[in-house]
Image (spheres, rainbow, N blue to C red):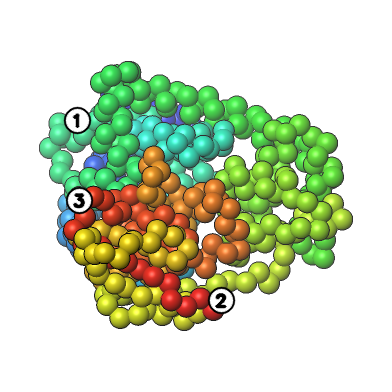
C-alpha cells in the first residue's frame, strides 16, 4: 500500500523518471530510511541511480554515532555515500543565525553541491504528510498568508523533491517494522523547547483524539487546495505587474503610485515579490512588513532590518544602499564583575540579593532586570538578537518571536540590534528594554534575586 502511494506521488507530480539520478538526503532517521527503502524497491522496476548524502551538523552529542550508522547502512545497501561535516554552531554565531536556520542553510548547500558533483542529480528529502500537517499548524499560528499555508511543495525549482509527502509518518514506521529495518532516533525531536516538537508530540495527538482522527489527511488535502489556488492568484498577479516594477540608478524600484490603483490582494503580493527580489528570499518577511511597505510615506525610510532599508522617493520605493550592519558579538558573563559590551558602548552590573532585603526591587526594563537566582544558569550568554529568537515575556500569554515583541513595543527596526539579549543556557531570560522571561521572573517564593543593572549607555 505504502509503495503504491509512493509511486503514485512520483507519477502524479513527475518527480523523476527512469534514468534519473537521485541524491537522498539521508539522516539515518525514520523518514529518510523509509525513503531509501522505497527507492530501492522502485529500483527493481525502474533504472534510477541512487546516492546518499549525509550532513553532520556537529551539534548533537550523538551526531558522530549517526554518521557511523549511515556509513554502515550505505555499505549494507550498496549505495554510494557522500558525507558533509561543518561546525553549524560556529556558522550561526558568525552570521547571526539561530542553530536551526544555520543548519538548514549549510545542509542544503552541501546537498546541492553534491547533487551537482554526481551529475546534476535531483535531491529527495523525507518530508511526510505528517510534516506537512505540522508545518501548516506552525504557519497558521504565525499568521501566514496563502503562500505560507500552502505548506511544503512536492517539488521545488531548485530540484528538491518530496516523494513521501502523501504518506503519514506512522505508515513509514509500520513499513520499516514489517521489513525489519532499523533507523536512528534523534533525541532532539523530544525537546519541548522547539515549537515543531510541541505540535508533533502534544497538539496533533490531542487533535486526533478529541476532534478529528484524520486531521493529518484533512490538512494535507487543504494545503493541496491552497497550493493550487495560490498558483492561480500568482499567475494573475504576474498579469497585472506590468509597470509596477521599474529600475532607478540600476536598482529595482516599486512604483507605489501604480501599485495603489490595484486591489489590495494584488498589492500585497506585488510587495512580497518585490521584497523577494531584493532579499533573494521571503524568510522572516511578515504581514506587518508588507503593510509597512504599503504605508510608507513619501520621503520616509523603512528599516525592515539592520541590512534592509527602503526609501520612498518621487513615488518609487527603492532599497537604500550602504545600510549599516551592526557588529556581531557574543560574551559570556559569570554575573559577578561588571560586563562591558564594547560594540554597543554599554556596561551592565550584576548583583545577588536576598528576597527579604529591605532595599526595594526596581522593575524598569530600560534600567534593570530582576531574575529568580535559582532559575538562572551561569555563565550567562550576551549576544545580538538573531532571526528566529523567541521567548515568553513576563505577563504575556506565551512565547512569541522577539521581532514581533519589539515591533509591538514600538522599537524601530533600525534600533533592534542595539538591544542585547541575555540567555541562561539556550533560554532568553531578558532583552534590554523588554520584560524578563516569565519562567525566570521573581515571585513570592523566590528566596534570592539576581539583578542586572545598566550602568553606562554611550550609544
Q: Nearer the viewer, residue 46 or 116?
A: 116
Quick one: SS at disc 3? loop
Q: Nearer the viewer, residue 162 or 276?
A: 276
Q: Is residue 445 above or below residue 450?
A: above
Label 3 to label 1: alpha-carbon separation: 49 Å
Residue picked out by circle 3: 445
| Nearer to us: label 3 or label 1 | 3
Q: Between disc 3 and disc 1, whose residue precedes?
A: 1
- On residue 329, the disc is none
Q: Between disc 3 and disc 2, whose residue precedes?
A: 3
Q: Between disc 2 and disc 1, whose residue precedes?
A: 1
Instruction: Name which residue lies at 38% across and 32% down.
Output: 133
Given contact means CB atoms under 8 Å apart, are the residues at marks 2 and 1 in contact? no
Residue picked out by circle 1: 174
| Nearer to us: label 3 or label 2 | 3
The answer to whether residue 57 of the structure is visible from this angle is: no
The answer to whether residue 202 of the structure is visible from this angle is: yes
Q: Residue 273, position in %: x, y?
A: 67, 46
Q: Residue furthest right?
A: 314
Instruction: State left or right for residue 204 relative to residue 272.
Output: left
Amino acid at each position: 500500500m505504502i509503495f503504491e502511494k509512493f509511486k503514485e506521488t512520483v507519477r502524479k507530480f513527475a518527480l523523476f523518471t527512469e534514468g534519473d539520478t537521485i541524491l537522498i538526503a539521508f539522516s539515518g532517521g525514520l523518514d529518510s530510511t523509509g525513503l531509501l527503502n522505497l527507492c530501492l524497491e522502485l529500483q527493481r522496476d525502474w533504472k534510477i541511480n541512487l546516492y546518499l548524502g549525509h550532513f553532520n551538523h556537529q551539534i548533537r552529542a550523538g551526531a558522530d554515532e549517526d554518521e557511523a550508522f549511515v556509513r554502515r547502512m550505505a555499505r549494507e545497501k550498496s549505495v554510494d555515500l557522500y558525507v558533509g561535516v561543518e561546525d553549524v554552531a560556529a556558522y550561526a554565531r558568525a552570521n547571526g543565525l539561530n542553530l536551526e536556520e544555520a543548519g538548514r542553510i549549510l545542509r542544503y548547500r552541501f546537498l546541492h553541491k553534491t547533487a551537482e558533483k554526481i551529475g546534476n542529480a535531483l535531491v529527495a528529502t523525507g518530508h511526510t504528510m505528517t510534516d506537512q500537517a505540522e508545518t501548516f499548524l506552525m504557519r497558521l499560528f504565525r499568521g501566514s498568508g496563502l503562500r505560507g499555508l500552502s505548506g511544503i511543495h512536492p517539488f521545488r525549482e531548485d530540484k528538491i523533491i518530496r516523494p513521501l509527502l502523501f504518506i503519514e509518518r506512522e505508515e513509514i514506521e509500520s513499513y520499516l517494522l514489517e521489513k525489519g529495518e532499523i533507523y536512528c532516533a534523534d533525541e532532539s525531536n523530544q525537546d519541548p523547547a522547539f515549537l515543531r516538537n510541541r505540535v508533533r508530540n502534544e497538539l496533533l495527538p490531542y487533535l486526533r483524539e478529541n476532534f478529528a482522527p484524520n486531521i493529518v489527511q484533512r490538512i494535507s488535502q487543504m494545503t493541496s487546495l491552497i497550493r493550487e489556488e495560490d498558483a492561480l492568484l500568482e499567475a494573475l498577479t504576474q498579469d497585472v505587474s506590468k509597470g509596477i516594477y521599474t529600475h532607478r540608478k540600476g536598482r529595482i524600484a516599486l512604483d507605489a503610485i501604480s501599485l495603489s490603483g490595484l486591489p489590495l490582494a494584488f498589492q500585497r503580493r506585488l510587495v512580497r515579490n518585490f521584497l523577494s527580489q531584493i532579499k533573494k528570499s521571503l524568510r522572516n518577511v511578515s504581514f506587518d512588513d508588507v503593510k509597512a511597505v504599503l504605508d510608507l510615506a513619501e520621503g520616509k525610510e523603512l528599516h525592515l532590518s539592520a541590512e534592509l532599508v527602503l526609501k520612498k522617493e518621487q513615488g518609487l520605493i527603492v532599497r537604500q544602499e550602504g545600510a549599516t550592519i551592526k557588529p556581531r558579538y557574543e560574551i559570556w558573563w559569570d554575573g559577578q564583575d561588571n560586563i562591558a559590551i564594547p560594540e554597543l558602548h554599554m556596561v551592565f552590573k550584576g548583583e545577588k540579593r536576598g528576597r527579604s532585603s529591605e532595599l526595594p526591587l526596581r522593575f524598569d526594563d530600560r534600567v534593570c532586570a530582576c531574575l529568580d537566582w535559582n532559575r538562572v544558569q551561569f555563565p550567562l550568554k550576551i549576544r545580538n538578537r538573531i532571526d528566529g529568537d523567541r521567548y515568553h515575556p513576563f505577563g504575556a500569554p506565551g512565547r512569541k518571536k522577539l521581532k514581533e515583541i519589539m515591533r509591538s513595543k514600538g522599537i524601530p527596526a533600525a534600533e533592534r540590534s542595539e538591544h542585547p539579549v541575555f540567555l541562561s543556557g539556550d533560554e532568553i531570560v531578558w532583552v534590554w528594554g523588554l520584560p524578563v522571561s516569565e519562567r525566570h521572573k521573581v515571585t513570592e517564593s523566590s528566596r534570592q534575586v539576581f539583578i542586572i543593572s545598566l550602568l553606562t549607555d554611550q550609544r
